[in-house]
Amino acid sequence: MLIESYPQTAFEFVVHCAMKRQNVRTLSLVVCTFTYLLIGAAVFDSLESQTEARRWEFLQAIKNNFVEKYNVSAEDYRMIEIVIIENKPHKAGPQWKFAGAFYFATVVLAMIGYGHSTPTTVAGKLFTMFYAMVGIPLGLVMFQSIGERLNKFASVIIRRAKRASGARCTDATEMNLMLATGMLSSIIITTGAAVFSRYEGWSYFDSFYYCFVTLTTIGFGDYVALQNDQALTNKPGYVALSLVFILFGLAVVAASINLLVLRFMTMQAEDAKRDEQDAQNLAAGNQPLTYDDESTYNMQGKLLENNYTTENDETVSLCSCTCMGGTRCLNHEPFVDPDFQPMDIIESTLCLKRASV
């Protein structure tokens, strides 16, 4: 009676419950993220702090021996440090000629930010900010678009492979696409690691680390390609290969991220649609429908509509089973209509529960 008399109040109540669930989810994500950060800080502290202390002691001992041996003053030693630090980027050749500038622009657009070279003039810093404001959104859209095309191409290949293998279900599921993009990402990283190990003289593990840090746009800058032996001017082929690796690799990573984002958006849309339908049913005086995440929604996240029966339906089951008659269901007793066989029209092996019983 209360629901029938005050449908708007009931509707607001359901909306309030839905918003409360969303707030709880957001708060849970925040707590999980900060907990993850605390765990990461503890692990990094345990792994790196002692090595850092030993390296500092070693470097201080070398510094003291150098100053004592050559009678270098503190001011002279500081000047030597500045010269060495400032000279390091020039080992790769001119950083701001076209090849080096193109490499810098690529790093900016891809949001990697190695820090191997930075603008020093006021005009250069201003242009970098404006260039990044336009270039970063442009790059994100480009990588997202390429990622979508890669996912489309992968879905076509997966469907053809399933047809060729005689599989009953030939659709490319999200899991199939994630596996495909994950395999492609692994191939790119492992191949790139071998190439950079060959050209840079790094160990394979360090090269793999560099590739991972680059394609995830972390860009620490502890390992940067094209920074030795005047590579920017003397090795144009290697420069082109490095740029292709960055751009194509980021596109593949964007394809993987695109799948995750779409999955999250699908979950959000499903929850919103569910809350809206419950609110409408409650406002109309009906009982809200109950949903089972694995049964009510198919692999594409689409709602299975009109899959519940009524009392007058001649095909209603006499048994306690509430599924829709998948071929795996062994719990069915005879139906009212003896000629009705759900397995004749339902080829899926899933036993899908009805949304309403």
Image: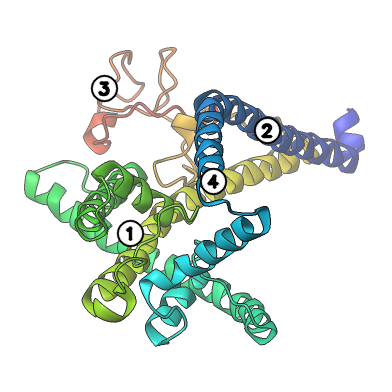
Q: Is residue 250 left or right of residue 56?
A: left
Q: Which one is closest to the eye, mark 3 or mark 2?
A: 2
3D distance between C-alphas at marks 3 and 2: 44 Å
Number of marks drawn: 4
Q: What amino acid does circle 4 point to?
A: Phe
Q: Residues within 10 Å of mark 1 (few under 14, many from 20)?
A: many
Residue at the disc numbered 1 = 151
3D distance between C-alphas at marks 4 and 1: 17 Å
Above or below, 267 relative to 42:
below
Q: Which one is closest to the eye, mark 4 or mark 2?
A: 2
Above or below, 178 relative to 1:
below
Q: Identify the element where label 4 is drawn.
A: helix
Residue at the disc numbered 4 = 264
C-beta proximity under 8 Å, tags 4 and 1? no
C-beta proximity under 8 Å, tags 3 and 2? no
3D distance between C-alphas at marks 1 and 3: 32 Å
Q: Which of the two discs, 4 and 2, labels the residue nearer the N terminus?
A: 2
Residue at the disc numbered 3 = 328
Q: Nearer the viewer, residue 13 or 286?
A: 13
Q: Is residue 174 left or right of residue 21?
A: left
Above or below, 210 relative to 134:
above
Identify the residue at horizontal 63%, vertical 46% (top origin).
Answer: 273
Q: Which of the two discs, 3 and 2, labels the residue nearer the N terminus?
A: 2
| Residue 223 sits in quarter | bottom left
At which x and y percent is residue 92?
A: 37, 71
Q: Which of the two discs, 1 and 2, labels the residue nearer the N terminus?
A: 2
Residue at the disc numbered 2 = 34
At which x and y percent is residue 113?
A: 53, 63
